[in-house]
Amino acid sequence: MTQDDHSDVAFHAFVKAWNEQQAQDTPIHHRRMLAWLHMHLDRGQRHLLLMAFRGAGKSTLVGLFAAWLLCRDPNRRLLVLAADVRLAKKMVRNVKRIVERHPMTRGLKPKERDQWAADQFTVVRRLELRDPSMLAAGVDGNVTGNRADIVICDDVEVPRTADTVLKRESLREVLREIDFLLVPGGVQLYVGTPHSYYTIYADEARAEAGESQAFLEGFRRLTLPIVEKGRSAWPDRFPLDHVERIRRRSGPNKFASQMLLQPVPATASRLNPDDLRPYEHELVYHEGQGQAVLTLNGVRMLSATAWWDPSCAAPDEDGRARGDDSVVAAVFTDAAGNHYLHRLLYLRVDRDDPTQRAIQQCRAVAGFLRDMNLLGIYVEQNGLGRFLPEQLRSELRRVRVAASVVGVTSTKPKAKRILEAFDARLAAGRLHAHVSLWNTPFIRDMREWRPQGRSGTRDDALDAVAGCLLAEPIRFDHPPPPDRRLDWRPGAVVAAAEWDV
């Protein structure tokens, strides 16, 4: 029998033949996956995303998919990308095993040993091609120069590649190179589960991460969570009581991420930006009857605090600050004790003129105080900041802005300050935030901040806002008038007496 005899074999028949040989059934969710893959390939869809719960056997099924592709056309070239080359080799070994044992692909195994390596192999084919039939590579390796008809991204996103901003950016840069590896008409297939709120698999853009569209915008998607409509997707292996044990053992965030395929942080965050109360109104300043009034959506503001957490703010070639951010925060408070985080200013300076960095920042801060109608600012004096208060006072005098400058030295651990400032106010729904903050890194920093250890995100903006909140005066509600109630003591009477004075 020649290989051409299998050029039109259906994927479900290929999988059925393999499972019968292995004396196992094809579960319902595998049938859904294989039907989806076959349908979209036949329709010429070039961009596919398959997400299924952990333990669903998706990599096993995709291995069968790869073997089936070679069965139908041995001249195809497949590249497997994974978080590291070890994981990619695992997929290649699985496909080699299928090619060796499947009744429809046994004739594809070459006789030459060098064509059957651990990280790549070449099946018997008619065309003489430079690239192997299947090649394993990690996202941290070099795949430049390879060409492929199909690229399978199998679990490229794992905690090790997605737990910090820099790692996620690096992963995206590598994955963007796939377009240069594919031949015209080539197919990209992503297989995995989300490991971050800012996952590459998100179906909508994360504005706070600088995205204008989802990373896999336009990809056809199949999402198979462990539970749908109260039923297990694989009841024989994951009955509902077992699913509940997994949920209790893994915790709500990890369960939602890995089993329900919802893009949330795998570990619980202490600062949930979903607890912020967004608003889009601007401050209104007016004077009348010799009195100045500042309102926000008609609500009068009683106090305001500005806080500057400074750094050198020297940018790299891409415009981002090296090291810590230099951030100014402005928080306003009303009579009811609600706090309004109205603006954050991320300061950047001219990288070619380091002698002017302090002056440039002070000028920007002076303009910020003027625009926000702020009458003073706290400046952290730790490190670089000890030189800035006097420089800022000089700049305020120069531009004729009447605002005081108070230098402060922080002695309490930063994580403790942030928790004390945010925890109770977020829980009480007292912290409002202007919608402009969703276009800054602040929301992302909140979502990924962890009190123990570095999360890979910068916490300078969080620290500046915490400084504002902790410096704001505590306002006590006016107590109600005493309640006049009848005396409950038996025999008690009220008597009036006259006094001679």
Image (spheres, rainbow, N blue to C red):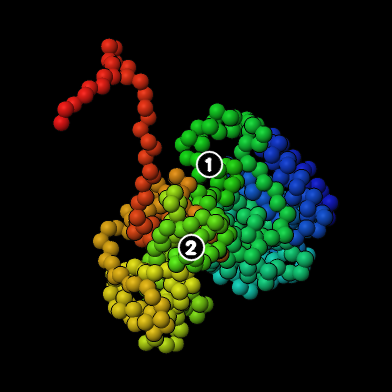
Q: Residues within 10 Å of mark 2 (few under 14, many from 20)?
A: some
Tell me the residue at 38%/60% (across/down): 468
- The answer to whether one can see residue 375 in this image is yes
Instruction: Return the x and y of residue 456 as percentages of the image width and height.
Output: 43, 61
Note whether 171 is above or below 274 in the view shown: below
Name the spot of residue 461 as percent of width and height, x first: 43, 64
Nearest to the observer: residue 168 or residue 271: 271
Horizontal side of 186 relative to 357 (left or right) equals right
| Foreground tag (1 vs 2) | 2
Instruction: Please report contact status of discs 1 and 2: CB closer than 8 Å, yes or no.
Output: no
Residue furthest front as drawn: 500
Compared with 364, 380 (above or below) is above
Q: Residues within 10 Å of mark 1 (few under 14, many from 20)?
A: many
Q: Which element carries disc 1, helix, strand or loop?
A: helix
Q: Which residue matches tag 1?
A: 255
Amino acid at circle 1: Phe
Q: In the rendered image of this protein, does residue 61 appear above or below residue 347? A: above
The kind of residue tagged 2 is: Leu
At 55% from the left and 46% from the top, the residue drawn is 257
The count of marks equals 2
In this view of the protein, can residue 419 be seen by the observer?
no
Name the residue rendered at 53%, 51% in the picture. 277
SS of the residue at dot 2? strand
Whichever of labels 1 and 2 marks the residue nearer the N terminus, that label is 1
Is residue 281 or residue 2 the one in the foreground? 281
Give the CA distance from mark 1 to mark 2: 46 Å
**In terms of image quadrants, where is residue 44?**
bottom right
The residue singled out by tag 2 in the image is 294
Q: Position of residue 388 (x, y in %)?
A: 32, 77
Q: Residue at x 53, y 64 (%)?
A: 284
**Which of 386/167 is in front?**
386
